[in-house]
Image (cartoon, rainbow, N blue to C red):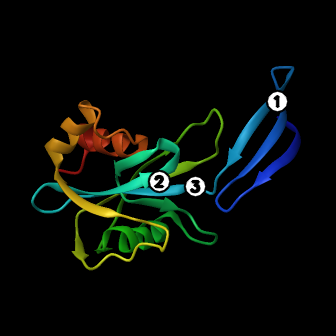
C-alpha cells in the first residue's frame, strides 16, 4: 500500500517518484518511472513479411530493429495510438486491427504497459515520422525475423515478445 510519494523528476514522456510503500508489514522505498503506456504493432503482409523500423535508440547506443510502436497520448485509446503511429512511422493505414495482448515492460521500476496489436489488412502510403525521428522501414520475412531473434540481431523486448507470440500462437 502506498504511504507516501515524492516527485523527483518530470520530463516530456515520464515522471519519476520515490514511493514509500508498506508490503506485508514492512515499509519499503521504491523508485518508480511513471509512463503513460504504449503500443506496438505486428504488421504482416500477404507475402509473409513483417514490418519493422530501424532507428537509433540513445540509451542502447545503437540503431535497433523494432516493431512500429509509440507512446499513448492523453485522451487516446491504445487502438487510436496504434493507428496514428502506424501511419507516422510505417506509412500504414490499417483496415482492421486485432488486439493480441498487453504486458509490462519492466514492472520492477516502471508502470509502462504495452498493448500489442496485429494487422494484416492495410494500405501502404508514405510514412510521416516526427521531426526528431530517423526511421528506416524494413520488411522481413516472418521466419527470418524469428531467426534474427535467435541470433541476437533483434534485441528489443517488445519486438521479441511480438514475434515469439506470433510464432507460438499467431493468427494463421
How far apart marks 2 and 1 lie (CA) works out to 28 Å
Q: Which residue is most to the top?
A: 25
Q: What residue appears at the point 17 percent right and 47 percent down from the top-left corner?
A: 142
Q: Residues within 10 Å of mark 2 (few under 14, many from 20)?
A: many
Which marked residue is nearer to the observer: mark 2 or mark 1?
Answer: 1
* Circle nearer the N terminus (1, 3): 1
The secondary element bearing badge 3 is classed as loop
Please name whichever residue, 144 or 64, is drawn nearer the observer in this view of the structure: 64
The secondary element bearing badge 2 is classed as strand
Q: What residue appears at the point 78 percent right and 51 percent down from the top-left corner?
A: 9
**Numbered circle sitting on residue 48:** none
Please name whichever residue, 107 or 15, is drawn nearer the observer in this view of the structure: 15
Question: Is residue 121 shown left or right of residue 22?
Answer: left
Q: Which residue is most to the right?
A: 4
Residue 3, by quadrant, is top right
* Circle nearer the N terminus (2, 1): 1
Q: Which residue is mark 2?
A: 115
Residue 116 in the image, given as x and y percentages of width and height: 41, 53
Q: Are marks 3 and 2 in contact (CB under 8 Å)?
A: yes
* Circle nearer the N terminus (3, 2): 3
Q: Are marks 2 and 1 in contact (CB under 8 Å)?
A: no
Q: Which residue is mark 3?
A: 37
Q: Residues within 10 Å of mark 3 (few under 14, many from 20)?
A: many
Q: Residues within 10 Å of mark 1 (few under 14, many from 20)?
A: some
Residue 148 in the image, given as x and y percentages of width and height: 22, 38
Which marked residue is nearer to the observer: mark 3 or mark 2?
Answer: 3
How far apart marks 1 and 3 lie (CA) works out to 23 Å
**Numbered circle sitting on residue 29:** 1
Image height of 93 relative to 150, above or below: below
Amino acid at each position: 500500500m502506498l504511504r507516501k510519494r515524492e516527485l523527483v523528476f518530470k520530463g516530456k514522456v515520464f515522471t519519476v517518484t520515490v514511493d514509500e510503500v508498506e508490503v506485508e508489514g514492512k515499509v519499503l522505498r521504491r523508485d518508480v518511472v511513471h509512463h503513460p503506456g504504449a503500443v506496438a504493432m505486428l504488421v504482416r503482409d500477404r507475402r509473409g513479411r513483417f514490418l519493422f523500423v530501424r532507428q537509433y535508440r540513445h540509451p542502447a547506443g545503437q540503431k535497433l530493429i523494432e516493431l512500429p510502436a509509440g507512446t499513448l497520448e492523453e485522451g487516446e485509446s491504445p487502438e487510436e495510438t496504434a493507428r496514428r503511429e502506424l501511419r507516422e512511422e510505417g506509412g500504414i493505414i490499417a483496415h482492421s486491427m486485432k488486439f493480441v495482448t498487453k504486458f509490462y515492460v519492466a514492472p520492477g521500476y516502471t508502470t509502462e504497459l504495452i498493448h500489442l496489436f496485429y494487422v494484416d489488412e492495410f494500405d501502404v502510403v508514405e510514412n510521416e515520422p516526427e521531426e526528431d525521428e530517423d526511421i528506416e522501414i524494413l520488411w522481413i520475412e516472418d521466419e527470418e525475423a524469428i531467426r534474427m531473434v535467435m541470433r541476437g540481431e533483434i534485441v528489443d523486448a517488445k519486438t521479441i515478445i511480438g514475434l515469439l507470440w506470433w510464432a507460438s500462437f499467431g493468427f494463421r
